[in-house]
Structures are given as C-alpha cells and as structure tokens.
Amino acid sequence: MSQDTLFDKVWDLHKVSSLPGGSDQIFIGLHLIHEVTSPQAFGALRDKNLKVKFPNRTVATVDHIVPTDNQTRPFKDNLAEQMISTLEKNCLQHKIKFFNIGSGNQGIVHVVAPELGLTQPGMTIACGDSHTSTHGAFGSIAFGIGTSQVRDVLATQTIAMNKLKVRQIWCENNLSNGVYAKDLVLHIINKLGVKAGVGFAYEFAGPAINALSMEERMTICNMSIEGGARCGYINPDEKTFSYIKNKLCAPKNDHWEKALTWWKSLKSDEDSIYDDVIKIDASKIEPTVTWGITPGQSIGINQKIPLLDELCPNDKLVAEEAYEYMSFKPGQSIKDFPVEVCFIGSCTNGRISDLRVAAKVLKDKKVSKNVKAFVVPGSEKVATEAKNEGLDQIFKDSGFQWREPGCSMCLAMNSDKLIGNQVSASSSNRNFKGRQGSPSGRTLLMSPAMVAAAAINGKVSDVREFIN
Amino acid sequence: MKSGFTPPIGKILQINGQCISLIGNDIDTDRIIPARFLKCVNFDSLGESVFEDDRKTLKGSHPFDLEKNKNATILIVNSNFGCGSSREHAPQALMRWGIKGIIGESFADIFYSNCVAIGIPCFTLPKKSIQQIQKYIDQKFLYLEINLKNSLVKSKDLNFTLEIKESSRKMFLSGEWDATSTLLKNKNLIENKFNDLPYLKFNNHFF
C-alpha cells in the first residue's frame, strides 16, 4: 500500500528527469511573475536568445512597487514607473497574460492567483517571491524562487531542485474566540524556530486546520517561509473545491467534473511516512504578537518579553540584538505598548475575510489620535467586494485611510514607510530590521483584528476585549 | 563596488581569498539588500548598497566598510544566513561587492539555491569551527584556499573539511550550476510532461 504524502505524489508527478548532480528537474504547472524579480530574467532570455517555452503557463500582475494613494500613470516615482513599463513590455513581447492596474484583477500576486481560480490542487506553482508558499493552502506544491530560476522557468517551464523532506504539523483542537490563523502560524514559528523548516515542506493538518476557511489556510501556508520552510501545504477538501468553483479560470462543465475527480484523489495516504511530526494544541493559543526582529520572537498578549535566561542558547544572540533594536526590556509586558502606525494588508492578511474581521472590531469606534492607520486591500477584487459590503466606509469612519491594492508597507517599496523608529502594528509577515522602510523602524506582527484593536487604543491590546 | 566585476562562468574548482567575518544569526535578505534597492531592472549597481542600513548604523565600523577587508572574497557567517525574501538581489549584491564563496553554520533554502544559480558556493561547518574562524579573523588576516574537488580548505594555521551538498558540488565542478542549458537538453521530456499532466487537459487554456 502506498505511504506517500501529497508532497511526494505531486513531486513525482512533475519530475521530468534526474539531473547528473543528483537534483531533480521539476515541471512548473503555473508560473506567476511580478515587476521586481522578473526584469533581469527576461533580460537573461534576451542575452541567451531564448523564448518563453509555454507563455500561457505564466501569468503576471504588478504589486510590490505600486503606489496606493495615486495610481495615475506615469507614477511619480520614476523607478517604479520604469519597473511597471518594463513588465508591460515583456508581457506584450512574450504574449504573457498581464493583470494590470484597472483590469479589475490586479493585486498582490498571492491574493490574485487564488481568487482567479488559477491556483488548484496538485499543481506545482513557482514565483519569484518567497510567499509563494501561500498557494499550498489548495494542496498545490508552491515555492519561491530567485530570478535565475524565473529565467529557467520562462525558458524551460522547469527548474533544478532537490526534493524536500516533509514535516507534518498536526494542530489539535480548535482556536478559541478572538484567536485567528495568524496567531496559530506565529505560535508554530515560535515553537519550531525560524530555521527549523530549512530542507522541509510543512504539511499542516489536524482538526484546527480542517476548521479554517480557505483564506485562513492561505495565511498559515503563507508564513511557512518564516519558519524556514520553502513550501507549506494542506490536503485539499470540499472547502478547497467549493472555493475554486466558478472562479474565472476554474475548469468549467465537463472539465470541472474531471478536475474534481482528480483533485479528490490527491491527498497524503493515511499511513504516510513523514520525516518528522510535530503536535500543536490550538486551543491553548492566545492572540500573539511579535516583540523582536524575527517572526519567531513572539509571545501571547498576556505574556512577558522573555528574559535571556529563559531562551535556548541558540536564540540568545538574536534576542540581545532584538532587545536593543526594539528598545524593549526583558520581562516587559507587550500589552499596552504604544503604537504609532497601524497597517492592515499584505499577502498574509489582505483578503476580504481579514478586512471583515477588522471592520467588525472598528465599527462605531475611532482610531486613537496618536495613530496613523491605513488599510491596503490585497487586490482590486478584494477592494470591490469590501466596497459592496460597505467595509470601506467603516474603515474611513473609524479614521483608517482606505488605499488602492498592492504590497505597500509590508516591505515599503512604495511611499508607505515608517519614519524614524516608529512602532507599527502590522498584519504583514516580517518584522526584520528596517523591513517597513525606515532603517530604525519597529514592527509588531499580529492578526488584522489585533491591529484594529491596537489602532483604537493607540497601544497593543487584547482584541478579545472588543469582541466578547 | 569593486571595479571590473566579472560574473563567474563555467567550472568552479577552487576559491582562494581573504576571509571577512559577519557575526549574527538569522541575517535576512532585507538586511543584505534593503527593499528600496530592488527598484531596478538589472543587478549592476547593487554591490555598493550591500548591507546599506547596517553599515550606516555602524558608521564605518561594519566589516564591509573596514579597509582591511576591502579585498576579501570569502564570507564567514553564522546560522540561517539569508532567511526571508527570495530576492536574488541579495547574493547578487554580495557577489558584486566581491564575495565569491560563503562558509556558514547554515543557510536559508531559497538564498542557498540562488547562490548555486549564480555561482557562489556555500559551505557549512559546525558552530564551534565557525566561531573559531571568526575569532581568528578578529586577530589576524586569514587567507583560505578551498578546493571544491575534495571540499578541503587550507590556510597557514587552520585546516577544515567543509560540508557542501553533493548535488551542488557536482554542479560547480561540471559548470552546470548555470542550469538553463542542462534543463534545455531534456526538451522532449519536457514536452512529454506537458502533454501528460492531468490538469493541463482541463486547464489547457487559461484565457
């Protein structure tokens, strides 16, 4: 009897050959590109006089550099304008479908592909962006690649890669009220560490995962990379199939039936052999906030920032660096720590369900006068849906700025940046030094609901006090 | 940036050079090259911006600013180096500054494969050995000769056997780290795979 994981099955299905060095040549079913990591890859194709092998297996959008205030072309930022126009030219020249601003389908690449129905179970998906792991929520094997590998996918639709090991992360019980997928994944990264996933794909499973919506599952898989795992996935189920059904690029009619039959056959065998298994009790997790400079440095809202002695030896060096950079004292509470900027958005938490949860907290409340708060929908579709539901008005009435879709202050490649050593409460994925645009800016990662609570109180707060 | 930068081509058998040490765990690619420098359509000018924010903070005392390190080519790092974003701009910036090889306790996955793809061998050593080397560099000039054939590293005072993934070592020795031409060789197999994959039959045209 077969004892393969979904990862093994999808990998084997896409294996083209064993390469002389010992790595595998893997076919990429869906290739997603954006303006930051593709121009040099197209340049390399031109240098080598190569063509795009299967242009309709690549789809493009623009997200990292787009301004979220005024999107009139040409952009005020010349470099940003140069990047979007380079992508436009490359897509036109190579006949690649490009969802540009104003198409109704532009947005953060990891928000757009699932909502178009491009992301499907059993596929291999690659993109020049580490958060490509997001797409694993659908039972695809999806991973970030660098620009040279983008070139390889464009030229050959394949890459050279070593097969990953698989660690199952079994999440028992259910999350309690006011605790979200973001809290669960931050907790997992804290327990396992930011490099535990190196060489692994993470399979998220168990009752707590089954109970999550597709968008929540995307939040979990999105941050696999923050735990060091290049790829994270969840076995597909009825929720997966019904999310995809009727999406623009979903299989239709007879094709839908064929797809469904195949997708239902795709899951890890019951007695699959994993390289490692970890158990997490989801019911014990509190709303979680990062205090440091890696996504692994997080605590529950009612916990104190750890003392050096409480940490394992390997974590001490970076903890000392974090205390200094964040100006936190070991043993200090995170609750009630003042925040100056509140950001809701990103490929981790910029989807419609994230906006709904935050709007529910903000309804009939006002953002603290000491806080600059803004919300950046993950895509044009998310923005339209939010407007149809009146969420934009709830955000605006509370004092949040309502922006146009893009990556924005997750990595601050546009003009949305922290200033000096400002503290942000952010629904994004990375709290690295300087990540949000200021070399001394400080980021506290948390769920969108927790960002909304922090915006109202002007300090880190327990969202359960708002919703219970 | 060093003048006259030429990217590596073909077989990489040997890396000789002075070592530069950078102490710290989990040094991410945002620190190696902050996101604002990703606003470019080629990699040419990244070398001068490597570790820009860390260097500004340290006002001239960052290892990449020290006069004694200006000709260094082998970078010594600690654990989980290159974590975070998949930006190839990070190893490209290191390479354009002058780095030709990296020795560390461990590397993040995507950073490691980006290094292989652009011809920077990354080797690992246990924590104790790395710390020993970093301590040595603190006091003295360290010049290493790394032989990729047997992974042996030699210097006047120190001797280590480096670890490197066998698949990567073979790719550097054969010159196939620049993977495109190797992948293209299997043109027919790629076509067969394209025709065989079940989902391409019900997704044959997206648009």
Image (tube, coloured by chain):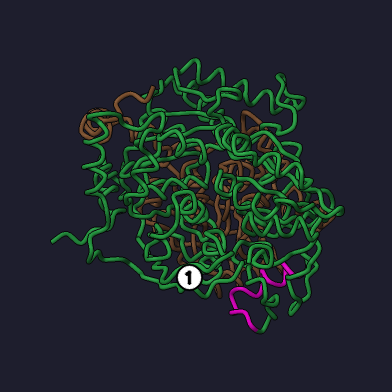
Chain colours: A green, B brown
**Which residue extends farthest right?**
A369
Would you identify the image quadrant in which residue B161 lies? Answer: bottom left
Front in this rendered view, residue B130 or A332:
A332
Tell me if residue A289 comes above or below residue B189 in the rendering: below
Q: Which residues are magenta?
A: A310-323
Q: How many marks?
A: 1
Q: Is residue A201 left or right of residue B92?
A: left
The image shows residue A12 at horizontal and vertical percentages of 25, 48
Residue drawn at (56%, 43%), measured in percent from left and top? A352
Residue drawn at (70%, 26%), measured in percent from left and top? A71
Would you identify the image quadrant in which residue A267 lies? Answer: bottom left
Membership of A152 in magenta stretch: no
Residue drawn at (16%, 59%), measured in percent from left and top? A2
Q: Secondary structure at mark 1?
A: helix
Q: Amino acid at mark 1?
A: Ala
Front in this rendered view, residue A247 or A16:
A247
